[in-house]
Image (tube, coloured by chain):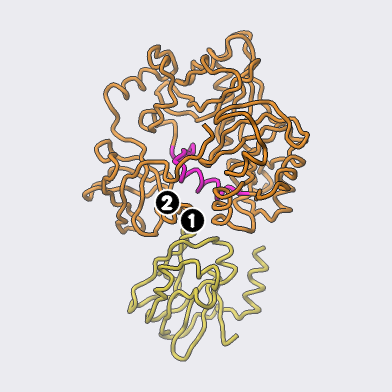
Amino acid sequence: MTESESLHTTPLDALHRELGGRMVPFAGYSMPVQYPAGIMAEHLHCRAQAGLFDVSHMGQAELVGEGAAAALEQLTPADVQALKPGRQRYGLLLNEAGGIVDDFMFANMGDRLFLVVNASRKHIDLPLIESVLPRGVTLRPLPDRALLALQGPAVATLIPTPMSFMGITEMQIAGIPVIASRSGYTGEDGLEISVAADHAEKLARALLAMPGVMPIGLGARDSLRLEAGLCLYGNDLDEGTSPVEANLVWSMGKRRRMEWNFRGADVVRDHLDNGVRRLRVGIRPEGRQPARGHTPIQRDGAVIGEVTSGGFGPSIGSPVAMGYVARDAAADGTALDLIVRDKPLAARVMPMPFHPHRYAR
Amino acid sequence: MPDMKYTKDHEWIRFEGDVAVIGITDHAQNALGDVVFVDLPEPGREVTAGESIAVVESVKAASDVYAPITGRVTEVNSGLVDEPALINSEPTAGGWFFKITPEGALPDDLMDADAYAAFVESLA
């Protein structure tokens, strides 16, 4: 069997090909890395107007039953129980060593929790969640749902909603029932839209027919999220990295940081109390040369870290990166050398996001 | 088109008197996507056919550019440093990379335009 034969496809596969998408393997799926407009134009268009992304490869599931929120809290330091109906949050699933198993979104739909996990991790996350559930709480994977993201400043006028950032609701778009949340992975205002797979293409065509909406591939999705300082699991987060090292302590609930009753809590607590040896930071190379993932980071000739994501930021007009550096090199403005093709490339630690978030808070 | 030759690494070579002007093909720039940076060789460098002597970075990835012939680099297109997008917009004109004065015999697998077009077709 060739690689392409073994790949999964999303419900929008035919549409991607019709739109001229350049299909590549990603997390076991055949996905469009770009359309004919190209990554640069797609990126800039999303920041200026609106872009439609197919993110149906991501895992969707619901958690139902009395005690579902408490059950999920065994695996995440996020505050799930205090999340109000109609609201969504970002969280981390942890292992016993306090390492990040995945980053995910969870939402309170009133009668159930709605979860979105990474495509590359769903085969790990769902059995993990299943393994901690008490009697009466059920995890229902939703493989028959597609997920679209409509992102950009024009979305608020194209699809008006009373929701603020991280709101979530069941509604209709173009007459099609969906679950829409005011969130995304670009730093822009916009919606993530869960829809029955059968209706996905009809919905995508309706969204593409709206003024100023352009299809956007994975290439621009990556450059948009990097400019927004958002992590990509597998690049910037992994099972050997704690929420403290990843600089994601903000995703931990205050109550959870008093109870310390989640998996890996002792390690996370130790990292918070005694500090960590490395931290995730933003990095701006000087000049125009990008530094990619796995680029070694030096300071005064000694290796002190590694770039985990890096590329060119079209909205910044210069290269941007994030990576892990030794704690004493993590302050904004610290001068670093990125070793690209055996030559040092001057860079500095910079605050993230590189491009300001424009969420509808 | 005056005496253009092509390589399987998707470079074009245009012979102008004693000098070979070299760049990447339209097919190559299209596959790379938007170019944001080029790292060019030092003029005067002696290079061997097949040796990686330049790097082109698109938004997505970095790719090597190889010396298609043996010889000495006499000039590089410094205009690409400030305007790398020329590689996308004018791959066989303003987007040229470097000039090499050939030394010795040319590689025997250089292709003419028709043979290169057939080669690209065979990759599809």
Q: Is residue B106 left or right of residue A334?
A: right
Report in which chain the residue with disc 1 lies: B
Q: Is residue A333 above or below residue B121?
A: above
- Indicate the quadrant where residue A179 lies: top right
Mark 1 vs 2: CB contact within 8 A: yes
According to the image, label 1 marks what residue?
B61
How far across and down, in percent of the image, does residue B27 sit? 60, 68
Q: Is residue A92 above or below residue A314?
A: above
Where does the magenta region start and end? Answer: A216-236
How far across and down, in percent of the image, does residue B113 sit? 62, 79
How far across and down, in percent of the image, does residue A210 sit? 71, 46
For the residues beneath circles 1 and 2, the answer to whether they share a chain is no
According to the image, label 2 marks what residue?
A292
The three-letter amino acid code for the residue at tag 2 is Arg
Label 2: how many residues lie within 10 Å, few (<14), some (14-19) or many (20+)? many
Report in which chain the residue with disc 2 lies: A
Q: Residue furthest bottom?
A: B17
